[in-house]
Amino acid sequence: MKFRINTKRMGLWLSVVLCAAMLGACSKQEEGSSAATEKPTAASVQPSADTSKASVKPTADSTPSPAASAAPTAVPTIPAKPVKDGPLTIQYVGNSCFFMTFPDGTTIITDPYPHTYDQQFGPAPEMDVDAMSISHSHADHSPGAKQFKGNPLRLLPALMKEPIQVGGVEVTGFNSKHVANMGDNEIFIFRYGDLKIVHMGETDKIESPEARAAVKDADVVLAYAGGYGADTIKNAVRFKELYEMGVKVLIPQHFSNNPDMIFYGGPTIDQVLADVPKGITIVKQDEFVVTKEMKQQFVQLTSMKMD
Ligand SMILES: [Zn+2]
């Protein structure tokens, strides 16, 4: 009798202990899963006000590339974001600076410049971005643009030995020469699904076989359209060659945004447009949406309005 009572008590006690242990395990699992889906810290990506999407599972679109999932390196990568399912859009800031928003919500800015160039290019960018690509270290393509909030990943040429994953975007870089023999320049390729966008930086030609293969058949090339130095290849020649490489859309960069302040000999937009090959449609837009259905065209983007 005594033994049976003790067994019941022990059973009850064991049940309580087991339940407590299970509850503890559940809450620990929840802690673990929320930690796993939390947005990364400022070390790799800027904080976002919107945490409501943090627990949505990424889809196949945002699977990290092999390079991103390889052994840890000194280069931080930004984990894929939950899919927002918006379009891939490109907006123009000024000089060589574009603001790209990808369907998973990842944002990347190219070649930002500081406020010291507001007169020449328009107001310097200040928006929240996940990453910025820097083609070279001249002040008008500046890694020293400090006006950004948070701590965007800086995609510097020296880091581009391997592809870097920024959310659902795979970024690769190819070394080239800056116009007028002014050092090195990085050509950046941004891939999202089957879409491919190229930013030439400040080079007038794409020389290495690897870079040419990467640029071939690009959906969009943000094409250098300056004219710095006597030896710089003419826009008409470069534009034609890019279309012959199968590029669908050219969007010019590094021309004189302010016709009253001609920048380093850069042509005005009217001079740039005069060099577009015959038969290529020219369109003017505030924002360009990248799709697979695009035909060959030349897009003049107006500078985006800053808040
Ligand atoms: Zn430069």
Image (cartoon, rainbow, N blue to C red):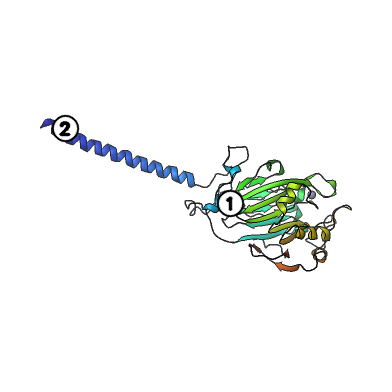
Residue 7: image x %, image y %?
17, 33
Q: Is mark 2 on a helix, strand or loop?
A: helix
User: Count the marks: how many?
Assistant: 2
Where is residue 43? Give x, y as percent: 58, 42
Foreground pick, 125 / 106: 106
Q: In which quarter of the image is residue 268?
A: bottom right
The residue identified by callout 1 is: 168
Q: Position of residue 20 (x, y in %)?
A: 30, 39
Q: Is residue 130 visible?
A: no
At 65% from the left edge and 50% from the top edge, which residue is drawn?
148
Pinpoint residue 175: horizontal percent, then vertical percent.
75, 45
Q: Name the residue under label 2.
A: 6
The amino acid pointed to by label 1 is: Gly
Q: What's under tag 2, amino acid-wise?
A: Asn
Rendered position, 256 above or below 142: below
- Residue at image location 21% in from the left, 38% down from the top: 12
Q: Residue furthest left?
A: 1
Element under disc 1: loop
Q: Residue 136 carries which label?
A: none
Q: Is residue 153 left or right of residue 36?
A: right
Front residue of 225/305: it is 225
Most foreground residue, 247 or 266:
247
| Quarter of the rendering occupied by the N terminus | top left
Residue in the picture at 55% in, 53% down: 61
